Image: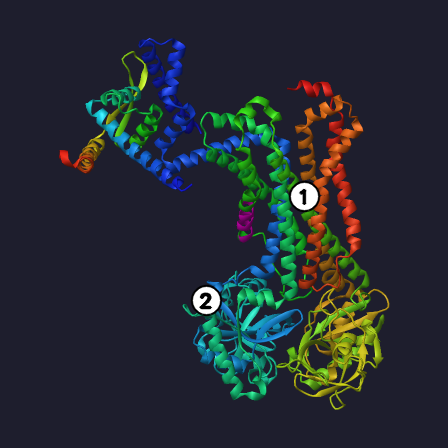
C-alpha cells in the first residue's frame, strides 16, 4: 500500500508540474490567472484518468491489476467496517447459504461422490450382471463367471474381484476370536487398484492359483493399528476362522477398501475361500453371484466398446452354461453409477439435501442482492463523482464486484463452522454394527474447494446485477438530490421480484421441511411394525467355527432352549436379519404369477426365522400359522409371506396353499400371512417380503432375540456367558438392547433428518424475512417525502400504514402463489425419488401460508409504523 | 446499423496508429537531450508547426510505458527555476528502437506516397 501510494504521489507531482508550467505559459501569453489554470486543465484532460492511465502504463497489466485489487479490497473493508449492520446481515445470510451447502456437499460426498482412494479412480469400472430390488441395483457375478470374463475381456487393464465376509479373527493362536469383516480378493487386487502397501508386499500371482494352499493376509491400516501398530508384524501368523494366515502386508492408511461404505479389516486371496467356509462350492458355483468385479478400462477404450465386448462374452457364457447363465447380461458401470444405483435411498437423500441447500443459498443471495441494491442510492453520489472525474464504468463494476467477493468470502468462511456443526449432527447417524460400515462425513479439502466455488457462484448471483444497476447512475440527478435519488420503476420492480422469489423459495423450503418432519414423526409414532423394547439382541455365526449344518442346528436348538430358561427371559427366538443389517434377497417365482416378458422371477427380501420369531418380535401372523419346530429339512418346505406379497402376486386369491420357488430350488408352500412391517428403514413404502424357516436352508449367522420381562440390558451378560458355555470360542457380535438398536438405527436417523431439514426451512424463512424487512425499510426511506406530502394533504397515520403494508405485502402474496405451485412440483418430485408414503397435503399449506404471512406482516409493519410517524414538515424541508 | 462495426474498427486502428506514432515522436524529441513532460509535449506540437495536436493527457501514460519497456530512463532533477521535476532521456535501447522505427516509418510513408500520388514519384 505504501509503495502504491508513493507511486501515485510521484505521478501526481509530475502532473501538477505540468499544470503549473502550462498555466505559467498561458499567463505569459496574456491570459488571466483563472483562465490560464482552466485552459491548462483542459489541455491535459481529466486529471483522474490521466493519473490512472499513467499508473497503469508504468506498472504493466498484471501489477496494475493486483494494485487495483488491493485498493478495491482496502476500500471495501473500510466501507464494510463503516456499515456494521449491513455487513453483519449480508455475511450472516451468506454464511447460512454457504454453510448449508458445504454441509450437504460433504454428506453427498460421503454417500455418493467421493472417489475410491486409489490413483486414477475414474478409470475403475464395475462389471457384472444386474441384481436389483426396489431400492438398490448392484452388479455381481459368480467366481467361475469372473474367471471367464477376466480371461476373455480385452478392454480392461485387468479385472479384479472381491467379496466381503465376516470371520472370526484371533491375533494369537488360541486367544478368543473377534468377528471381523474381511474381503476375499483375486490375487491381482492391489496391483490393479495400484495400491502400494504401507508395509510388506502385495499378493503374488501364484498365491491365487492353488485352492487352499497360500494362507497369506494383508491387514487394513486400522486393524494393524488396533493390533498395536507393530512394524515387525510382517511374517507373523494370525488366525482367521481357525486357520493360521501369514501377514505379508499392511494396506496404506488412506486405502479404505474397494467399496464406498464398507471398510474391510483384512484381505485374503480368493483361493482361500473354500477353506474359510467349509463350503467347497464357493469357487465352483456358477449360479450364485458372490463377487463384485471391477477393473480399469484400457486407455483409448470407450465405455461403449467395453460394453459391446461384455455383450459378446455374456452370450458366449449363455451358450456354454445355459442352465445358470440364461438371460444374464453383463453390464458396465462407472464408480459413480455403482454407488448411486447401489443405494437409491442414499442417492435420493443426497439429492434432496443438496437441492434444499441450494434453495437456501438462492434465498441468501437474493437477500444480499437486495441489501446491495438498497445501498445503491446511498452510494450514488460517490459513484457519480467517480464517473464524473473519468473513472470507467467497467472499473467501477469491478470495484463493486470486488466488494461483493469480500462479502462472499467472509460469508463462506463464516459458513464453515456452521457446516462443521451440521456434519457433527450427521456423524451421530451410526449404523449399528461392530463392523466398519460407516459413511465418513468430513469437512475436507474437497468440501473447502466446494465452499470456494459456492462463494464464487454467489458473487455472480448476488453481486453482478446490483453492480450494473448502481453504475447506471444518472449524473445530474445524483448530484441534485443526494440520498433521495429517483430510482425509477424498474429497479423497484426488480426488488419486488427478489422478495417474491425469496418468499416462494422459502415457502417451498418450509413445506418440504414440514412435510419431512411430519412424515418422520408420523412414522416414528407408528413405529416399524415390531416390538421396539424389552428385547436383547446378539449375533453369532457358527460357520466361523466350521460347524456343519447339523452342528449349527444343534447349537441353535440348545441356545434357544437354554436362553428361554434363563431368569427374566420370556421367550427366545432366532432371525437372520435385523432391519436391513442382515437382510438378503432371493429370486422368487410365485406360483401362477405371470411376469412380463424376459423376466421369470423377482428379487424379494426375505428373512430366515425360527418358530418363536413372530411371537417374540411381535409381528402378528394374520392368517395360517407361524413356523413350527417340525418345519425341518425332512419335512415339506414352507414359507410365510407378508400382506403385500400376497396381495401383489395373488390378488383376490387365497395365498395359503400357494407355492413359491426360491433361487430356482425347491418349491415351498405358503402356510401363513404375516402383517406388514418395515424391513429396511422407517417410512419405507410397503414392500413384498417373505420368511423361510431357518431349519430348512443352509445355515449361517443368526441373531438371537431374547424378550425380557424387565430391562433387557441385564440379559446381555448372561446371554454372552451362555453362548460361551455352549461354544467356547464362538465370537458374539452386535450385542445390544432393542432400545439401543432402535434409537440409533431408527429414531436416530429420522430425527437427524428432521433436524437438518427443519433447520434449512427455518433458515430460508429467516433469510427471506430479513430480505422483506430490508425492502420495506428501503422503500419507506425512499418515500419519506411523498408520505410527508400525503400527510400534509390530509392522509392520517392509518392510511399511510395501510398503504405501506399493502405495498410490502403485494410481492409476498405473489411469492406465496408462486411458492404454492413450486411446492406442488417439489411434492411430486419428492414422492418420485424418495419412497415415503406421504404427500404434501393441504394441511401443510394451511399451516405454512398463515405462518409466512404473519411473519411477513411483521416485517412490513415495523417500517410502516416508522412511515406513519413521519412528520410532514421535516419531511418536506429535507430538500 | 451496418456501419457500426466498421466505425469501431476504424477507431481502434486510429488509436493503435497514434500510440505507436506518439512513442516514436517522443523518442525523436529526446534525441536532442533530456527533457520533462511539458517540454516534450510542446516541442512535438511546435516541431510539427502545430499540425499534430498531442493530447497532453495521453503523453504521460506513453512516457511511463516507454520507461517500463526500457526505451527511456527517468531521473528526478531540478529544472531551470529550481523546481523538482522528472527528466526523461533516451537509453541505448531506445536509440536503437528509434532507428528501427524511423526506418520503418520512412518506408511506410514512401510506399503510401507512391500509391496516393503515383504521378509525382
With respect to residue B59, does A643 lie above or below?
Answer: below
Q: Nearer the viewer, mark 2 or mark 1?
A: 1
Image x and y of residue A707, in percent: 82, 71
- Nearer the observer, B32 or A560: B32
Prevailing secondary structure of the magenta residues: helix
Label 1: how many residues lie within 10 Å, few (<14), some (14-19) or many (20+)?
many
Tag 1, which chain?
A
For this orientation, the residue located farthest to the bottom is A634
Image x and y of residue A193, in percent: 48, 68
Is residue A449 found inside the magenta-colored segment of the image?
yes
Q: Residue at x 76, y 27 (%)?
A: A868
With respect to residue A252, does A593 lie above or below?
Answer: below
Label 2 residue SS: loop
> Which residue lies under the disc numbered 1?
A500
Is residue B46 found inside the magenta-colored segment of the image?
no
Tag 2, which chain?
A
Q: Quadrant of residue B10?
A: top left
Query: In the image, which residues are magenta?
Result: A446-455
> Which residue lies under the disc numbered 2?
A194
Amino acid at each position: 500500500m505504501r509503495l502504491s501510494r508513493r507511486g501515485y504521489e510521484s505521478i501526481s507531482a509530475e502532473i501538477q508540474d505540468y499544470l503549473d508550467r502550462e498555466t505559467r505559459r498561458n499567463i505569459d501569453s496574456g491570459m488571466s490567472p483563472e483562465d490560464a489554470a482552466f485552459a491548462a486543465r483542459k489541455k491535459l484532460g481529466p486529471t483522474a484518468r490521466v493519473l490512472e492511465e499513467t499508473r497503469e502504463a508504468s506498472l504493466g497489466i498484471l501489477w496494475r491489476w493486483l494494485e487495483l485489487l488491493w485498493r478495491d479490497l482496502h476500500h471495501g473493508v473500510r466501507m464494510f467496517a463503516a456499515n456494521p449492520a449491513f455487513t453483519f446481515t449480508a455475511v450472516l445470510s451468506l454464511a447460512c447459504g454457504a454453510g448449508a451447502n458445504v454441509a450437504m456437499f460433504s454428506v453427498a460426498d460421503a454417500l455418493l461422490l467421493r472417489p475410491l482412494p486409489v490413483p486414477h479412480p475414474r478409470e475403475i469400472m464395475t462389471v457384472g450382471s444386474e441384481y436389483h430390488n426396489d431400492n438398490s441395483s448392484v452388479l455381481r457375478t459368480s467366481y467361475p463367471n469372473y474367471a471367464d470374463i477376466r480371461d476373455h475381456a480385452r478392454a480392461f487393464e485387468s479385472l479384479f474381484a472381491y467379496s466381503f465376509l465376516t470371520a472370526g479373527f484371533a491375533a494369537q493362536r488360541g486367544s478368543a476370536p473377534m468377528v471381523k469383516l474381511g474381503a476375499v480378493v483375486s490375487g491381482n487386487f492391489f496391483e490393479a487398484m495400484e495400491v502400494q502397501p504401507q508395509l510388506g508386499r502385495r499378493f503374488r500371482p501364484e498365491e491365487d492359483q492353488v485352492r487352499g494352499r497360500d494362507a497369506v493376509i494383508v491387514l487394513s491400516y486400522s486393524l494393524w493399528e488396533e493390533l498395536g501398530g507393530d512394524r515387525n508384524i510382517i511374517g507373523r501368523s494370525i488366525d482367521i476362522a481357525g486357520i493360521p494366515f501369514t501377514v505379508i502386508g499392511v494396506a496404506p492408511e488412506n486405502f479404505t477398501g474397494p467399496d464406498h461404505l464398507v471398510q474391510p479389516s483384512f484381505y485374503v486371496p480368493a483361493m482361500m475361500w473354500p477353506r474359510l467356509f467349509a463350503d467347497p462350492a464357493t469357487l465352483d458355483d456358477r449360479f450364485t453371484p458372490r463377487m463384485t468385479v471391477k477393473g480399469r478400462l484400457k486407455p483409448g477404450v470407450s465405455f461403449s466398446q467395453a460394453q459391446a465386448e461384455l455383450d459378446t462374452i455374456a452370450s458366449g457364457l449363455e451358450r456354454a452354461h445355459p442352465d445358470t447363465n440364461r438371460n444374464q447380461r453383463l453390464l458396465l458401470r462407472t464408480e459413480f453409477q455403482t454407488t448411486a444405483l447401489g443405494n437409491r435411498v442414499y442417492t435420493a437423500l443426497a439429492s434432496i439435501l443438496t437441492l434444499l441447500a441450494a434453495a437456501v443459498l438462492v434465498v441468501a443471495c437474493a437477500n444480499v442482492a437486495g441489501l446491495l441494491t438498497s445501498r445503491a442510492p446511498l452510494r450514488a453520489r460517490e459513484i457519480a463523482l467517480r464517473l464524473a472525474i473519468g473513472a470507467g464504468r467497467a472499473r467501477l463494476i469491478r470495484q463493486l464486484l470486488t466488494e461483493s467477493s469480500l462479502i462472499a468470502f467472509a460469508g463462506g468462511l463464516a459458513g464453515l463452522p456452521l457446516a462443521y456443526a451440521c456434519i457433527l449432527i450427521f456423524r451421530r447417524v451410526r449404523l449399528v454394527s461392530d463392523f466398519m460400515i460407516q459413511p465418513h462425513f468430513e469437512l475436507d479439502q474437497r468440501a473447502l474447494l466446494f465452499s470456494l466455488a459456492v462463494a464464487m457462484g454467489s458473487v455472480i448471483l448476488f453481486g453482478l446485477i446490483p453492480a450494473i444497476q448502481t453504475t447506471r447512475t444518472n449524473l445530474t440527478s445524483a448530484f441534485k438530490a443526494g440520498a433521495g435519488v429517483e430510482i425509477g420503476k424498474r429497479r423497484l420492480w426488480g426488488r419486488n421480484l427478489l422478495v417474491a422469489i425469496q418468499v416462494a423459495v422459502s415457502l417451498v423450503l418450509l413445506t418440504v421441511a414440514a412435510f419431512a418432519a411430519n412424515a418422520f414423526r408420523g412414522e416414528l409414532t407408528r413405529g416399524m411394525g415390531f416390538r421396539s423394547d424389552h428385547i436383547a439382541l446378539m449375533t453369532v455365526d457358527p460357520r466361523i467355527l466350521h460347524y456343519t449344518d447339523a452342528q449349527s442346528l444343534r447349537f441353535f436348538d440348545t441356545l434357544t432352549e437354554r436362553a428361554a430358561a434363563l431368569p427374566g427371559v420370556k421367550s427366545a427366538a432366532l432371525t437372520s436379519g435385523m432391519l436391513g443389517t442382515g437382510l438378503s434377497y432371493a429370486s422368487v417365482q410365485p406360483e401362477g404369477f405371470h411376469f412380463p416378458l424376459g423376466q421369470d422371477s423377482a428379487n424379494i427380501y426375505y428373512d430366515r426365522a425360527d418358530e418363536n420369531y413372530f411371537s417374540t418380535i411381535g409381528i402378528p401372523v394374520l392368517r395360517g400359522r407361524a413356523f413350527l419346530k417340525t418345519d425341518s429339512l425332512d419335512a415339506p418346505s414352507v414359507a410365510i409371506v407378508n400382506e403385500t406379497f400376497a396381495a401383489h402376486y395373488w390378488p383376490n386369491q387365497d395365498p395359503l396353499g400357494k407355492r413359491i420357488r426360491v433361487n430356482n430350488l425347491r418349491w415351498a408352500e405358503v402356510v401363513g400371512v404375516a402383517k406388514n412391517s418395515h424391513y429396511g428403514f422407517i417410512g419405507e413404502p410397503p414392500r413384498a417380503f417373505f420368511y423361510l424357516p431357518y431349519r430348512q436352508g443352509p445355515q449361517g449367522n443368526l441373531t438371537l432375540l431374547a424378550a425380557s420381562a424387565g430391562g433387557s440390558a441385564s440379559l446381555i451378560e448372561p446371554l454372552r456367558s451362555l453362548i460361551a458355555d455352549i461354544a467356547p470360542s464362538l465370537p458374539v457380535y452386535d450385542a445390544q438392547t432393542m432400545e439401543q438398536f432402535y434409537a440409533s438405527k431408527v429414531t436416530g436417523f429420522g430425527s437427524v433428518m428432521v433436524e437438518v431439514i427443519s433447520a434449512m426451512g427455518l433458515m430460508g424463512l429467516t433469510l427471506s424475512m430479513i430480505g422483506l424487512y430490508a425492502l420495506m425499510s428501503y422503500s419507506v426511506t425512499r418515500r419519506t417525502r411523498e408520505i410527508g406530502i400525503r400527510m400534509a394533504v390530509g392522509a392520517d397515520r392509518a392510511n399511510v400504514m395501510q398503504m405501506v403494508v399493502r405495498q410490502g405485502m403485494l410481492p409476498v402474496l405473489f411469492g406465496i402463489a408462486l411458492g404454492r405451485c413450486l411446492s406442488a412440483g417439489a411434492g411430486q418430485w419428492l414422492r418420485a425419488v424418495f419412497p415415503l408414503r406421504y404427500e404434501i397435503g393441504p394441511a401443510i399449506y394451511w399451516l405454512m401460508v398463515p405462518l409466512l404471512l404473519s411473519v411477513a406482516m411483521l416485517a412490513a409493519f415495523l417500517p410502516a409504523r416508522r412511515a406513519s410517524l413521519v412528520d410532514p414538515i421535516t419531511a418536506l424541508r429535507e430538500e | 446499423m451496418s456501419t457500426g462495426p466498421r466505425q469501431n474498427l476504424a477507431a481502434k486502428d486510429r488509436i493503435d496508429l497514434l500510440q505507436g506514432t506518439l512513442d516514436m515522436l517522443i523518442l525523436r524529441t529526446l534525441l536532442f537531450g533530456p527533457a520533462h513532460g511539458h517540454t516534450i509535449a510542446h516541442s512535438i506540437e511546435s516541431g510539427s508547426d502545430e499540425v499534430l495536436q498531442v493530447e497532453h493527457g495521453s503523453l504521460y501514460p506513453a512516457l511511463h510505458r516507454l520507461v517500463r519497456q526500457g526505451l527511456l530512463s527517468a531521473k528526478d532533477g531540478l529544472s531551470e527555476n529550481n523546481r523538482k521535476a522528472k527528466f526523461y532521456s533516451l537509453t541505448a535501447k531506445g536509440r536503437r528502437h528509434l532507428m528501427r522505427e524511423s526506418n520503418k516509418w520512412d518506408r511506410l510513408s514512401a510506399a503510401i506516397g507512391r500509391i496516393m500520388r503515383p504521378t509525382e514519384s
